[in-house]
Amino acid sequence: MREKKREERRKRKKEKKEKKRGKKENGKDKEEEERRGRKIKEKEKRKRKKRIKEKKERRKKKEKERKKKRKKKKKGEERKEKRKKK
C-alpha cells in the first residue's frame, strides 16, 4: 500500500514538473528570459561605451600634459641659449 501511494505521488510530481517545463518553454517565462537577456546586453553595451569614453578622456589628458611639458622644455632651452649668448 505504502509503495503504491509513494509511486503515485512521484508520478504526480513528475507530471507537474513536466507541465511547468512546458510552460517555461512556451509561455511568459521564455519572453521574460529574452527580455532579461536584452537588458543585460544593453547594460554591457553602456558599460563598454563608458569605458571607451574614459579611455579617450585619459588619452586627451595625457596629450595635454605632454604638450605642456614640451612647451616648458622649449622655453627652458631658449633661456639657456639667451644666457649663452650673453
Image (cartoon, helix red, strand yellow):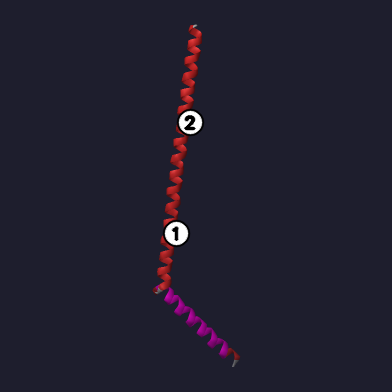
Report the residue that reaches farthest toward the top: 86
Magenta stretch holds residue 21: yes
Residue 27, image quadrant = bottom left
Q: Which residue is mark 2?
A: 65
Relative image position of residue 23 (x, y in whole percent)? 42, 76
Q: Which residue is mark 1?
A: 40
Residue type at tag 2: Glu
Left or right of 4? Residue 44 is left
**Residue at 54% in and 86% down:** 9
**Residue at 40% in and 69% down:** 31
Q: Secondary structure at mark 2?
A: helix
Report the residue that reaches farthest toward the bottom: 1
Q: Secondary structure at mark 1?
A: helix
Range drawn in magenta: 4-25
Relative image position of residue 34 (x, y in whole percent)? 41, 65
Give the alpha-carbon distance from disc 1 to disc 2, as whole Å: 38 Å
**Residue at 43% in and 73% down:** 24
- Pick the front one: 14 or 3: 14
How many labels, in total? 2
